[in-house]
Amino acid sequence: MTSEETRCMIERIGRLKKEKRAAVLCHNYQRPEIYEVADFTGDSLGLCQKAQNVDCDIILFSGVYFMAESAAILNPGKKVIVPAMDAGCSLSDMITVEALLEKKKEHPDAAVVCYINSTADVKAESDICCTSSNAVEVVKSMKEKKILMVPDKNLAAFVAKQVPEKEIIAWDGFCPIHERITASYLRDALKNRPDTKIIAHPECTDDVRDMADYVVSTTKMVEVARNDSAKDFMVITECGMVNRMKGELPDKNFYTVCSVCFDMKKNTLEGIERSLITGQHEVVVPRQVRERAYKTFDRMFKVSATVGITPQLMEMT
Ligand code: SF4
């Protein structure tokens, strides 16, 4: 598409949103042109909190499936649609509800903390949900000493280091996108850049996280770069994030060692326009699953509110 065609499509999507009373929630890893049609851009925690009170009839979620499912769990009265039904998450696919039930039998005294990157079924069988923004506080808040953390072993290892008083049993899942970024790639990228601060996502492996100055969720990445007096930052996560950081902090320099999540990139402006016209593809969570999964979110929100973690969202105009 030429830039003029893109501009026209963005305008058409803007008109469709008004006509259908639709809001577009966009994850930080989306293509930059999608930010242009988003009402809100943020990380999983910010978007799922926003999904609870956004004033609209339709939520179009530009992210991956579990995120739209989370919006549907939190908004039973609203229609939730996605542009690409096959935009999934390899990490969330690394656990099934049947396997979780088996594991719970092995550890009947453990509380189950599930990362938001999991299916509604898995959430329904968990005690509480967490995101990369609040995982440490969520685990600290549990009364049980033993915690079964699913499905990301890297996030679990990150939490275990900061909450040594808990016994963390990690599920053997991982995000293939973050796992692909190795410490040796990072060392190469840092050659001749001695003053560069490293910001990594908790889904990165131990050795990458150990090299980082900050290990934070995607939206928190913007905040730490804004508040740090350094000018140069190496951003270690999915490739889309660095575009957002460059856009928000044009006076700083951002470099990246990153990997592309092709599922995130299945969403396009064309797909968003088509979804708004046709009302497809609707994400529906069965009531029984939804009600149980909702409780895990509700507990997480209460912990977040108690420790003062506020949603990290950027309202787009
Ligand atoms: Fe899932 Fe990893 Fe893609 Fe995020 S980057 S959606 S965790 S596969």
Image (cartoon, grey):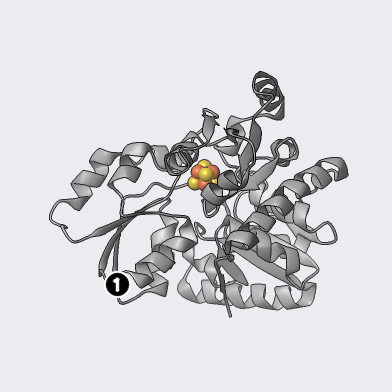
Residue at 76% in and 56% down: 74
Q: Is residue 176 left or right of residue 73?
A: left
Element type at mark 1:
loop
Query: Is 98 in front, or is 158?
Result: 158
Which image quadrant: the C terminus?
bottom right
Residue at 36% in and 67% down: 225
Residue at 57% in and 41% down: 89
How many callouts does the rendering have? 1
Give percent across and percent down for residue 88: 61, 43
Q: Is residue 38 visible?
A: no
Give percent across and percent down for residue 232: 25, 65
Give percent across and percent down for residue 59: 73, 63
Query: Is 213 in front, or is 40?
Result: 213
Q: Is residue 1 left or right of residue 278?
A: left
Residue annotated with mark 1: 252
- Name the amino acid, label 1: Lys
As displayed, is residue 140 above or below residue 93? below
Query: Is 8 in front, or is 253?
Result: 253
Q: Is residue 224 visible?
A: yes
* Circle 1 Cα neighbour tier, 10 Å, few/some/many (<14 / 14–19 / ≥20): some
